[in-house]
Amino acid sequence: MKIAFLFAGQGAQAVGMGKDMYDNLDSVKAIYDQFEDIKALCFEDKDGVINQTAYAQKAMLLTGYAIASALKEKGIVPEYTCGLSLGEYTALAFGNTWSLKDAIEIITNRGRIMQEALPLGTTTMAAVIGADREVILDCLAQVKSGVAEIANYNCPGQIVITGDNEGIKEACQLLIGKCRRTIPLNVSGAFHCSLLNDASKELRTVLDRFTPHKPEYTMIYNVSGHEEDRPLNDILQEQICHSVYFEDSIKYLLAQGVDTFVEIGPGKTLSGFVRKTATTPVTIINVSDFASYNDALSQLL
């Protein structure tokens, strides 16, 4: 068995995430109790802000870290880790690249920077279903009225485009007849595109306040879909304004012999991406709550 941990990205967050793990596992309780404000956000969200970027990212990081740490406590550790966008930071935190406290400070700033980067209502994203990347790239190259780029290569037949409202509207028109459909996404901004170049520079000033250690587990990075030898802060600065090659990451992991994918965090989005990408049988496990945690232990121990 060769295991990869996949850490969920923004959009999977939900009020109550981590609560039953907290109630049943002392180690998880100890992690959440270090961050009372984030614990309250995850478990109650009395202010109704958990879906805002500035709050969602730190909530997801703490929850993913706590769940993965509970598995590690039982001796279940991966050979490879990766995550979708903010999930990459969770993977790095789990690998002790930074202390948990430092990781929370970094991701809190990243969420704030991303939320403040673009005027609300001026940018957007859309999922393109049923088209090859070359077809989409060709259509995007024809856009004249604004910015339209690829944000996420999620899996075969599912790619997310990102940009300003005018560019994405024109891109969706150009894609008519060349894909099954396009789906507007309910997001607060155009993530993973050149519109965040300035934000990437601001993020870099935050990252450079911390000295990262080499991750304890082999990381597969969003910006390329494979391992990287470059300085980590260069990679993370690029990631915020660069396409996420998640499909390529899954294919790379499969090529390395990974046969067991464990999705860490709420939702099953990444598990779906693996199913649509893998061409040979693999084991896919999601760990998001105490019941699925126990199911994972029964399969992995």
Image (cartoon, rainbow, N blue to C red):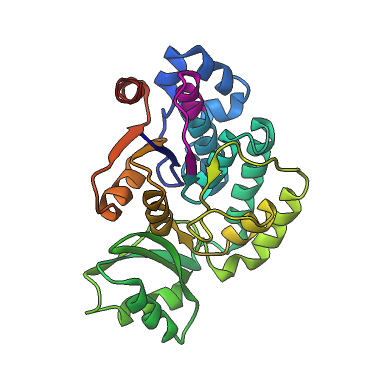
**Residue in the foreground of this view, choosing between 150 and 73:** 73
Residue at the outermost right position: 209
Residue 169 drawn in magenta: no
Which corner quadrant holds the C terminus? top left
Q: Is residue 69 above or below residue 205?
A: above
Quadrant (top left, top right, bottom left, bottom right) of the N terminus: top left
Is 204 on the left-hand or right-hand side of 16?
A: right
Q: Give the range drawn in magenta.
A: 66-81
Rendered residue at 27%/42% (across/down): 282
- Do we see residue 44 in this rendering? no
Q: Where is residue 271 in the image (x, y as percent from the top left)?
A: 32, 44
Q: Position of residue 37 (x, y in %)?
A: 60, 28
**Which percent across, then down, holds residue 29?**
52, 17
> As displayed, is residue 40 above or below residue 107?
above
- The answer to which of 229 and 58 lies nearer the viewer is 229
Q: Quadrant of residue 195?
A: bottom right
Q: Is residue 248 left or right of residue 85?
A: left
Q: Position of residue 153 (x, y in %)?
A: 40, 62
Give the quarter of the image for residue 259: top left
Left/right placement of residue 74 relative to residue 112 reads left
Viewer-side residue, 172 vs 300: 300
Q: What residue do we see at 23% from left, 45% from top?
A: 281
Q: In this view of the protein, which residue sits in the foreground, 121 or 254?
A: 254
